[in-house]
Amino acid sequence: MLDLPPHCRALLAAKTASNLTFAEIASSVHRPEVWTTALFYGQATTDDTTAEAIFELLGNSSLLENYNRDFVADGGVKMTKERLVGGLSGRGEGNMGVKGMITRGGTFEVPPKDPVLYRLYEVLVVYGYSYKALIQEKFGDGIMSAIDFRTSLERKKDPKGDRVVITLDGKFLPYSSTDSWQG
């Protein structure tokens, strides 16, 4: 079981009830699909306007009624609109006293046990040094940013079976030279 904040569990329950896809939700709030999905899993925060739009899209009061009926009965904490919108915009539990502060990547163990996540982890284990070497050769000594970053996932038709195409698009960040250390 993922260790998700309560607002994420409420959102995922509402998404299931709505029969909307992440692509449809992202399109409705004018945000990228992968980023919107990350928001639902507590790996991103958003502004109040987007948080409100997601709340309205997913059925607002019925979202809360269904969540509260199912989860509060099991000892969970009652979800309110303020808690849900606040959680999405970085003012919820888990923000550690700083608006927008969340723990990214803290929702699963490494290596992951889920087969899809494990295979993505395996890609980095098998090809990580290749990526690192090629970045070094093509750009110099540095890293690919995961902050100034874009990603997408597409389905590509193939006669031998459809392919998953994941694009990782990060800005190159060079390491500073020791010359810049002179104060």
Image (cartoon, grey):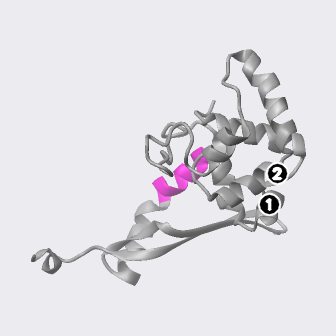
By secondary structure, the bulk of the magenta-drawn segment is best described as helix
Mark 1 vs mark 2, CA separation in Å: 16 Å
At mark 1, the secondary structure is helix
- Report the residue at 43% width, 42% height from top: 97
- Report the residue at 65% width, 60% height from top: 35
Residue 108: in magenta span: no
Crowding at dot 2, Cα within 10 Å, few <14 / some 14-19 / many 20+, comes out as few
User: Looking at this view, is 33 or 56 the one in front?
Assistant: 56
- Report the residue at 76% width, 61% height from top: 26
Q: Amino acid at mark 2?
A: Glu
The segment highlighted magenta reads: 117-126
Disc assigned to residue 8: none
Where does the N terminus fall, quadrant-wise? top right
User: Looking at this view, is 24 or 49 the one in front?
Assistant: 49
Q: Position of residue 105 (x, y in %)?
A: 50, 46
Q: Position of residue 3 (x, y in %)?
A: 58, 33
Q: Position of residue 162 (x, y in %)?
A: 80, 63
- Count the numbered circles shown: 2
| 141 lies left or right of 124 | left
Q: Which residue is mark 2?
A: 56
At mark 2, the secondary structure is helix
Q: Which residue is mark 1?
A: 23
Give the image quarter of residue 80: top right
| 179 lies left or right of 63 | left
